Amino acid sequence: MFRYFPNNYVWNLSVDLSIEMGARIGEIEEMCAPLLAASEHPDAQGTRAFRETWSAMADKLCVLAQEDEQQDRLYSAGEKYLRAANYYLTCERLQAHGAPGRNELYRRFLAVFDLGCRYTGANCQRVEIPYEGTTLSALYVRAEGNAPRAPVLVQVNGLDSTKELKYFVGLPLWLAKRGVSSLIVDQPGSGEALRLHNMKARFDSEHWASRIVDWLEQRPEVDPARIGLEGVSLGGYYCPRAVAFEPRFACGVVWGANHDWRDVQQRRREKEGSFPVPHYWEHVRWVWGGENIEQFMRIAENVHLDGILDRIRVPFLVTHGEKDSQIPLKWAQRTYDQLVNSPRRELKIFTAREGGAQHSSFDNSINAGHYIADWVAKTLGGRVAGTISSGEKQHEYSGA
């Protein structure tokens, strides 16, 4: 784990996530150097300072992008807009619910991300899925190749991630290379659903997941028999729960198990484990509801997978980081152990050797992400060999 701030796990997590989303190290240094003292301050004061330096860098990149636009250098402009979106998102994520200007910052992020995708010609389309009289926003990344109907992996957020964060990290593009489409959704309790529509999270994730499957089944380029579901972090709860109660999913994947989130909350009240965001207890009540911690804890009582996973009868991959300091490794084992009726269950622990050993592999996502992409492609009928067949492989390097 890259630790710019010696005593601030939450800020280091944010910086590492930004790096995984494509931040440039020179810009990281310029943004973080003035924040070393602020990283020791209380949440409100420190996160304001964080926002000031990171949004200033994003603002500068937008000005540079506008200069590119004036010269018709649209691809260059798009690259800068995407990096600016990364930095806006990173500092927005750390702000407290209701912090002045947070909503405007989020809307600015959405607009800049859209510009970046359009100017770079990204394989990334914003779509909206009907839900409860409104819509769920999502990013749709199409499989590469000429298959008339492609498999698709639906991807959902954790407690504090967004669809754009998951897109930036890379799994959708890695899947596209393997002939698998992606639908990355801001489900209730996350992203736009929470910030712009105040949709709270719900423990019965199949409620919204089934509406997503309904929408995908209507798309002519999607094979309705090959729709999988992946969840990251708290999505390690949402995903298995949805797959258990929605039999149309063809497989499930968790990138960081989260078998018993109610227990995690109890431990966090006892000061065990690391928090993912500042203002943690205010954040979880914003996501889930509850006027106070006691009411929130009653809501959290439902967020566990015991007595549910024996309903799953499709292939399922459980992954976890060996050094995860947020969710203990034992919960990955519990999820795997209870998948007794899955015809092909697998538990993969990412270690320091291959990287991705921290929570949901935020320390180094690429090897872990490609492992997941290969598993999904093999399970849903995509491609894993690339352009060179196994018979054509040549090994010129003989080192260890």
Image (spheres, grey):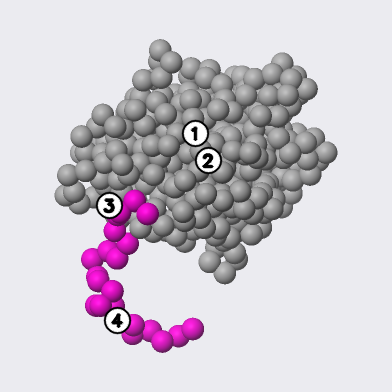
Q: Which of marks 3 and 1 is in front?
A: 1
Q: What stretch is highlighted in magenta?
A: 379-400
Give the crowd class for mark 1: few <14, some 14-19, many >=20 residues within 10 Å: some
Mark 1 highlights which residue?
Answer: 245
Name above or below for residue 293 compared with residue 66. above
Q: Which of 54 and 211 is in front in this view?
A: 211
Left or right: 373 in relation to 386: right
Mark 4 highlights which residue?
Answer: 394
Q: Can residue 20 be seen in this view?
A: no
Q: Distance between the residues labelled 3 and 4?
A: 24 Å
Q: Is mark 2 in CB contact (under 8 Å) with mark 3?
A: no
Q: Residue 313: x and y, percent?
A: 47, 46
Q: Can residue 118 be seen in this view?
A: yes
Image quarter of the N terminus? bottom right
Q: Which residue is drawn at 23% across and 50% down?
A: 144
Q: Distance between the residues labelled 3 and 1?
A: 27 Å
Magenta run includes residue 14: no
Q: Which of 275 and 68 is in front in this view?
A: 275
Residue type at mark 4: give it. Gln
Give the crowd class for mark 3: few <14, some 14-19, many >=20 residues within 10 Å: many
Residue type at mark 3: give it. Gly
Q: Which residue is drawn at 33% across and 85% down?
A: 396
Give the crowd class for mark 4: few <14, some 14-19, many >=20 residues within 10 Å: few
Q: Residue 342: x and y, percent?
A: 49, 50
